[in-house]
Image: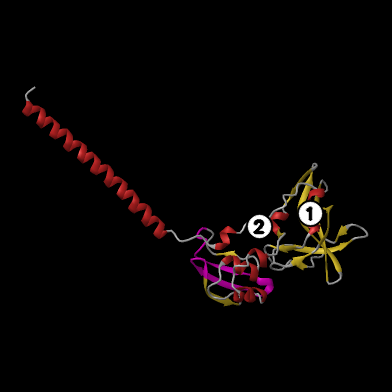
């Protein structure tokens, strides 16, 4: 092959290598720009997301007795019904509801045992027994059927003080919670602590919706935008 032809081939190869190198560099640059933009657009995680409440994972009566070893706090107020309980008979009066447990209400569980399930002879309820205003009450936390326990206390109760779990919340938020009020800027978890369980108008968009809280007979409607209260209305 003549020297001139070899030189032309070499120039073509060098050009191809240079183009490939430029293309590779451009691809890496584009990915870097995209990653940088994504980081700019993604908001930082809320401090609440880093809170991981402890759980007991009870699977029978003995393990559920752990509820008696420390105070507990109600996760969703105005949702769980409690009844009069007769310690002597070991029986709850399920025919007469006393009320519903309040938002982050603090309880001292005295015992965890089983009781009848009205109308279901082959199933028993797992109940937590506590005292309030000098009287004894109970509320169901699970069931027992065919020797199998299903206990839901981890979904119903905190075993750590929510004030300590969410100590990063400012004092004015905790003040509003203690007064069962929602102020503009509060998020939905804070509203849950203040007003108890609510019913959202849109179950799909978790951050942008209006939630109606029965609030123990004093209904409140709160509109959230980007998970922050923007409008609070009282009344039905």
In the image, is residue 65 part of the stretch drawn in magenta? no
* Image position of 23 with respect to 39: above or below: above
Residue 41: x and y in percent read 40, 59
Q: Residue at x 23, y 43 (%)?
A: 22
Rate crowding at label 2 as few (under 14), some (14 to 19) or many (20 or more) other CA atoms within 10 Å: few
70 vs 198, nearest the viewer: 70
Instruction: Name the residue that disc number 2 marks.
Output: 53
Which disc number belongs to residue 184? Answer: none
**Residues drawn in magenta:** 204-228
Rate crowding at label 1 as few (under 14), some (14 to 19) or many (20 or more) other CA atoms within 10 Å: some
Instruction: Name the residue that disc number 1 marks.
Output: 66
Q: The N terminus lies in which quarter of the figure?
A: top left
Judged from this view, the residue extending furthest toward the front is 3
- Label 1 element class: helix
Q: Is residue 178 left or right of residue 4?
A: right
Determine if residue 95 is in view.
no
64 vs 3, nearest the viewer: 3
5 vs 141, nearest the viewer: 5
């Amino acid at each position: 092959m003549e020297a001139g032809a070899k030189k032309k081939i070499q120039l073509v190869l060098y050009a191809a290598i240079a183009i490939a190198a430029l293309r590779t560099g451009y691809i890496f640059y584009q990915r870097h720009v995209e990653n940088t933009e994504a980081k700019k657009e993604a908001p930082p995680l809320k401090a609440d997301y880093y809170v991981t409440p402890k759980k007991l994972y009870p699977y029978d009566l003995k393990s559920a007795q752990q509820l008696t070893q420390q105070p507990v706090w109600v996760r969703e107020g105005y949702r769980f019904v409690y009844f009069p309980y007769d310690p002597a008979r070991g029986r709850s009066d399920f025919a007469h509801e006393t009320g519903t447990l309040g938002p982050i209400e603090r309880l001292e569980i005295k015992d965890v045992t089983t009781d009848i399930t009205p109308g279901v002879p082959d199933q028993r309820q797992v109940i937590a027994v506590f005292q309030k205003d000098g009287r004894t009450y109970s509320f169901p936390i699970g069931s027992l059927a065919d020797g199998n326990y299903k206990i839901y206390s981890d979904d119903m109760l905190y075993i750590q003080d929510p004030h300590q779990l969410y100590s990063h919340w400012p004092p004015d938020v905790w003040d509003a919670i203690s007064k069962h009020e929602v102020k503009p800027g509060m998020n939905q978890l804070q509203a849950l602590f203040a007003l108890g369980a609510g019913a959202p108008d849109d179950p799909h968009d978790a951050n942008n919706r209006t939630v109606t809280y029965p609030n123990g007979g004093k209904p409140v409607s709160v509109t959230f935008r980007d998970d922050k209260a923007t409008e609070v209305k009282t009344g039905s």
